[in-house]
Image (cartoon, rainbow, N blue to C red):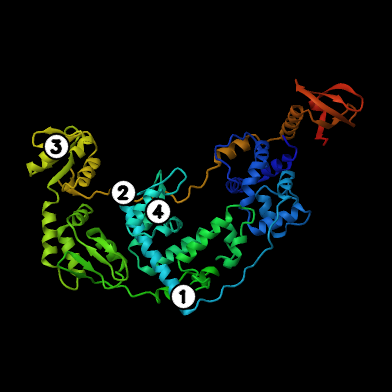
Amino acid sequence: MSTHARPLADWLAASSDAELAALFTARGVRTDSGWSDYFDAAEALLEPASLARMLPRLTLREAAALRIAVDGGDAGAERAGLTALGLLRPDGTPYPPVLALVAGRSFPDDVAGEPRSPASEGSAARAAESAFTTVASLADLLLHARETPLALLAGGGVSAGEKRLLADSGVPAESIDSLLSIAVDADLVRADGRRLRVSAEAERWLHARVGDRWERLAEGFLQALPRGLRQDAGGWPELSAWPQAHPWDPSWPERCAALMERARLLGLVADDGSEPEWTVPLREGGEVDAGPLTALLPAEVDRIFLQNDLSAIAPGPLAPALDVRLRTIAARESAAQASSYRFTVESIAHALAAGETEESILEFLGSLSLTGIPQPLSYLIVQTAQRHGLVRVSTDAENGRTRIDSVDRHLIDAIAVDQALRPLALSRKEASLSSRVGRDTVYWALTDARYPATLVDADGTTLTADRNPVTTGPVFVVPDYTPLLMRLRAQQGPDADAAWLDRELEAAVRTKAVLQVTVGMPDGSTRDLLLEATGLGGGRLRGRDRAADVERTLPVSSIRAAVVVEQ
């Protein structure tokens, strides 16, 4: 063990649980670390690999202050923070392993950043249009993920196949990664195992007005900024200072470029680099206000034209809540300021499966249409509603198996021989079918096979099925270091000096190091010996006395101090 770890071990022992938890979190310490005492913790925190993982996380000011301390200066205002990260001793000097790693590193000057010029009227309009497009595209992404959660790769990214499906649903292919990051920052999607699902917040966001949608995204972007881009008073520094925010992080240029692209998509910076007026309050730490942005957007509409060819035309951007509901009933064919939708048997059946009824659909479309409900569309809705529910899926109270019933015997016969349903292992039971597979799984299998299925309970009441419920788990799980802290505290006591000495002696014996040993004599005096450590056991240290060239055996209890002599 390196003797350099002793000061850090003492500092750790004197720190509060909150300070230790903050340090362990910042340093990425595992909650199940096998440390048995503070000496183990100090040694691990000063390992070159652990320090190398921490240095890229330092901000420009922290890196500059640490470099000043390494050069023998005062770290100034950053001293307390660097001490709390286990990089500086309480006296402000760096630990030797830190000194060795930082000595060869450079950093740019603390650049305040040149102020952005205010956006011109044309640039602001284009930035607002970019924000509007981003909000609309993100709504498309969330509606897709609500129906079919996105599969995640082992590294946490979305596969190329999922990106193709998103592009097919109207999400711009070149912006998918940025849109997903914006959605994660705003807590609209969350990882649930190997799936990316919409959150409960996403449901509220989808039904909000455009201005409220944008404000949520802008706030999420601000809250998710890394430490190097956070200001003490809130907000962020000038964009020209962003590239220097984390000077020792080799991945920062790529991360910085990705953040700037998100800012552009959100309309926080114009394409020419100028700053729209709605960005200023955010940058300065004030309240987000979408008013100046929405003033440049086309007005939302709350009416549509229903046509005889089973299509619908919105003469402008349809109010989000209306658009979301309409898209559960009709498939959107084109997206622009004037969008078009098309009604099909499948789209109507989808709405019925989601909880709509014939009456609710007709009432909604009637309140929305400027042209009434054309007869072909009314006929389609009525006919599909009459057919919906012909196949009833329930749980048999007698045996707990899933039961499939229908008043149409031809449908039962068709289901029984459908090869696509073979995995359900259906068996005949009088005029119904039975399966060991769960009720919901059977229902969705029948729905996917385009049978007019519905879920019912034991009393025959129709149930609404939710294939992909929203995820309600925490956004970020705070590491719980309580067991680790309890283990460390349990080893803290009056014998800490003796335990540390034993560790130093063991390390010296392993490396055949030369020690300057201070030995307590019977008369109360002390004597210094220069020993080449050769063995430790039975409470005694063995070593060759360099000065007298003889072997000596010293009781460990008599050793007052032992310092490794550099060769």
Quadrant containing the N terminus is top right
Residue drawn at 73 percent across, 50 percent down = 104
Q: Can residue 198 be spotted in the picture?
A: no
Residue 368: x %, y % from top left: 21, 69
Q: For the residue carrying disc 3, how many other residues have a C-alpha within 10 Å: few (<14), some (14-19), or many (20+)?
A: some
Q: Is residue 86 above or below residue 373?
A: above
Disc 1 target residue: 124
- Disc 3 marks which amino acid? Ala
Q: Which mark is residue 189?
A: 4
| Disc nearer the start of the sequence (1/4) | 1
The secondary structure type at the circle numbered 1 is helix
- Disc 1 marks which amino acid? Ala
> Contact, CB < 8 Å: mark 3 with mark 4?
no
- Disc 4 marks which amino acid? Val
CA distance separating discs 1 and 4: 29 Å
| Disc nearer the start of the sequence (4/2) | 4
Disc 2 target residue: 468
* Residue 399 picture quarter: top left
Q: For the residue carrying disc 2, how many other residues have a C-alpha within 10 Å: few (<14), some (14-19), or many (20+)?
A: few
Residue 10: x %, y % from top left: 71, 42
CA distance separating discs 3 and 2: 27 Å
Q: Is residue 215 above or below residue 162?
A: below
